[in-house]
Image: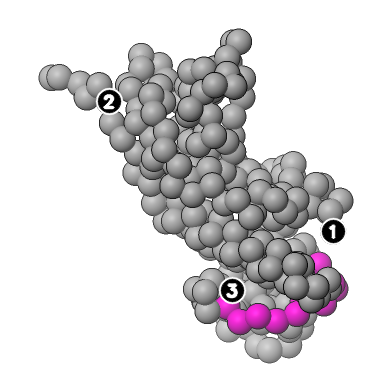
């Protein structure tokens, strides 16, 4: 059977590392072939035409040659470079975090079209938010305390959907132990059981989960990002939600994510 020698794919660049003098190995995330590694020859040479479209988190159209081990990127054309997002340290750090999540949770060479779409949607949301902030800053009416509300919620939204798409949907409607419907009251949360727990199962609670925290988590779980209303999250409430979600991620990965400490530093 004749093998296909080249093909075209769109991709988001998740990671890169240097190879030899001038080349790079990229971790690509693609709609149909999932996550895999490819070689970008000469990508570190200043005259490389491809290089600009192969930066981290670029969304590009690639022409690929099939290699013996790794495929080789022969041409790259930018679809979206997320320019405003790149100019905002906070937004860029959020985006790196989402890329780290995908890289950690998604195995190589398996299609994850819904996760691909989710990542693209989140990058567009970060870009739109960065643009809005830059506009407000230029007009002198940027509200500092509300500046991060949207991006913090976006990260929690992304975590919930990512876990759901790979088969670890967090339980926020029924008790993760006895399956009874959760009531609007203080409940508990235990990452190793996969979600929230009712008061009758309090002996299994890992931490408390306030009524408001559960409401926000449920809202994110059942709403498309575009329809999530804008609201201000006070620090304590957000910390509670973040703790619950990080607990789940840590349980599945059995480790912390590198970006957590960067995000913490910037806040
Ligand atoms: Zn229960």
- For the record, the magenta segment spans 228-241
Give the residue at x 65% y 88%: 183
What x and y, as percent, mark residue 37? Answer: 48, 28
Q: Are marks 1 and 3 in contact (CB under 8 Å)?
A: no
Kindly state the secondary structure of the residue where label 3 is placed: helix
Query: Could you say which quadrant of the image residue 174 lies in?
Result: bottom right
Q: Are marks 1 and 2 in contact (CB under 8 Å)?
A: no
Disc 3, ligand 1: is the CB inside 8 Å?
no
Comparing labels 1 and 3, the label whose residue is closer to the camera: 1
What x and y, as percent, mark residue 212? Answer: 73, 83
Residue closer to the observer: 227 or 255: 227
Query: Could you say which quadrant of the image residue 177 lies in?
Result: bottom right
Specify the quadrant that holds the N terminus: top left
What x and y, as percent, mark residue 234? Answer: 82, 77
Q: Is residue 14 above or below residue 154?
A: above
Specify the quadrant that holds the C terminus: bottom right
| Cα–Cα span, label 1 and label 3 | 22 Å
- Please name the residue that numbered disc 1 is placed on: 267
Count of all numbered marks drawn on residues in the image: 3
Is residue 207 visible to the viewer in this orientation of the structure? no
- Please name the residue that numbered disc 3 is placed on: 220
Q: Is residue 19 above or below residue 258?
A: above
| Cα–Cα span, label 1 and label 2 | 45 Å
């Amino acid at each position: 059977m004749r093998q296909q020698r080249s093909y075209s794919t769109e991709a988001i660049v998740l990671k890169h590392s240097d190879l030899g003098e001038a080349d790079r190995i990229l971790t690509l995330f693609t709609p149909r072939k999932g996550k895999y590694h490819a070689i970008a020859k000469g990508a570190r040479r200043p005259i490389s035409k491809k290089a600009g479209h192969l930066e981290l988190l670029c969304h590009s159209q690639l022409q690929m040659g099939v290699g013996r081990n790794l495929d080789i990127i022969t041409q790259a054309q930018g679809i979206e470079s997320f320019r405003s997002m790149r100019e905002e340290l906070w937004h860029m750090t959020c985006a790196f975090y989402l890329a780290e999540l995908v890289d950690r949770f998604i195995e190589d060479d398996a299609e994850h079209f819904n996760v691909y779409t989710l990542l693209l949607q989140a990058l567009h949301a970060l870009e739109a938010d960065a643009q809005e902030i830059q506009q407000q800053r230029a007009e002198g009416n940027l509200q500092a305390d509300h500046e991060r509300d949207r991006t913090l919620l976006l990260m929690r939204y992304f975590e919930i959907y990512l876990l759901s798409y790979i088969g670890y949907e967090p339980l926020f409607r029924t008790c993760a132990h006895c399956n009874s419907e959760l009531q609007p009251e203080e409940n508990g949360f235990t990452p190793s059981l996969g979600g929230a727990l009712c008061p009758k199962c309090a002996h299994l609670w890992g931490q408390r989960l306030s009524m408001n925290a559960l409401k926000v988590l449920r809202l994110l779980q059942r709403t498309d990002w575009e329809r999530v209303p804008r609201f201000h999250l006070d620090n304590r409430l957000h910390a509670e939600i973040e703790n619950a979600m990080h607990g789940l991620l840590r349980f599945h990965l059995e480790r912390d994510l590198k970006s957590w400490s960067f995000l913490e530093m910037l806040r």
